[in-house]
Amino acid sequence: MSTPQNTPASARAPGISLKVANSGPVTSATRISLRQINAFYGAKQALFDVNLEIPDNAVTAFIGASGCGKSTLLRCLNRMNDTIPNARVEGQILMDGVDVNGAEIDPVSVRSRIGMVFQKPSPFPMSIYDNVAYGPRTHRIAPTKADLDALVEKSLRRAALWEEVKDRLGKSGLGLSGGQQQRLCIARALAVSPAVILMDEPCSALDPVATAHIEQLIEDIRKHTCIVMVTHSMAQAARVSQITAFFHMGQLIETAPTDQLFTAPKLEQTQDYITGRFG
Ligand SMILES: Nc1ncnc2c1ncn2[C@@H]1O[C@H](COP(=O)(O)OP(=O)(O)O)[C@@H](O)[C@H]1O
Ligand SMILES: [Mg+2]
C-alpha cells in the first residue's frame, strides 16, 4: 500500500477537492491585456514579465504566497503604483485596447473607470448616503437630487445593503459592522458604474457570515463587470472565481479556468502550492 511518503509524484492526485462553485467556460471578451509587465520598487524587482488576459463578466483570482506580487499587479491596473515613491512599472496595460499608461491618459480618469475595494473596509468619515454619492458627485454623474437619490438606492441594493441601512442613510458609515462597511465600500465603487472592480483580499478582515455575503454579492456583480480579486484563500478563489492566476516570487506561473487549475494543474509548482506542500 502506498503512503504519502512513498507515492511517486506522478501517481499523486493531481489536484485537491475544493468546491469549485461558479467556474465554467468564460466566453466574454478580454477587458484587460497585460503585456510583459515588470515592476520595481527601487532596485528590487517585484514582477517579472507578466502576460495575462483578463476577461469581462468574470472574476479573475490572483493567488500565491504572501509577497509574490499580487497586490503590486493589482495596483498596476489602476495606476496606483504611480502614487508609491520608488515604484516603477514597465510593459503595457491595455484596457479595451487603450494603453492606461499612455502619455495622453489622465490617471484620475483611469481610476474612475476602475473601482477598488481594499482589505480593511474603508468608508469615508461621512454619512452612508454621502459615501455612495461621493463618486457620482465628483464625476457629475447624477444631475438632480432625485437622480442622485435613485443612484444611491440602486447602488446600495446591488451591494445587498439597502434593506439594512435605508432608515439611517444620514448616519455615519463608520457606525456599521465590518461586513456592512465592506458592502458600503462596494456600493461606493458600483455607484460610478466602473468597467472593472479590483478587490485586494476583500474578506480577510471579515467573519464567515459577512464573507459569504460578500461572495454572493461578487457573483451577482461579476455578471456585468470585470472583477479582479486577490485572495490568500484558495477555497475562496475556488468558490468565487472563473479564472485563477497563480503567482510565485513575482512570476505568473499558471493561469487557467478555476476548475482546471484546482483539479488538474499543468505545472508541478502549481500542484505543490494548491496541495499545501509549500507557500
Ligand atoms: N511600497 C513598497 N516598497 C517596497 N517594496 C514593496 C512595496 N510594496 C511591496 N513591496 C515588495 O514587493 C514584493 C511584492 O509585494 P506585494 O505585491 O505586496 O505581494 P502580495 O500582495 O502577493 O503579498 C514583496 O517583496 C514586497 O516586499
Ligand atoms: Mg497583497
Image (tube, rainbow, N blue to C red):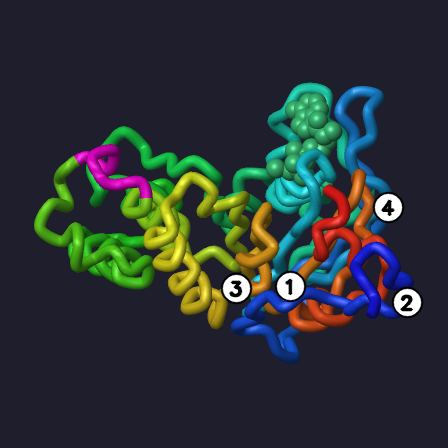
- Which residue corresponds to mark 4? 49
**Which of label 4 and label 3 is nearer to you?**
3
**Which of label 2 and label 4 is nearer to you?**
2
> Decide: marks 1, 3 in contact (CB < 8 A)?
no
Residue depicted at x 36% and y 46%: 207
Please give the range of residues in magenta. 172-178
- Dot 2 or dot 3, earlier in sequence: 2
Q: How packed is label 2: few (under 14 Cα within 10 Å), some, or many (20 or more)?
A: few
Work out whether residue 17 can be spotted.
Answer: yes
Q: How packed is label 3: few (under 14 Cα within 10 Å), some, or many (20 or more)?
A: many
- Dot 2 or dot 4, earlier in sequence: 2
Picture disc at residue 240: 3
**Which of label 4 and label 1 is nearer to you?**
4
Question: Which SS class for mark 1?
Answer: strand
Question: Which SS class for mark 4?
Answer: strand
- Dot 1 or dot 3, earlier in sequence: 1
Question: Which SS class for mark 2?
Answer: helix
Label 4 to label 3: alpha-carbon separation: 27 Å
Residue depicted at x 78% and y 44%: 248
> Decide: marks 2, 3 in contact (CB < 8 A)?
no
Residue 56 place in picture, x, y as percent:
59, 67
- Which residue corresponds to mark 2? 10
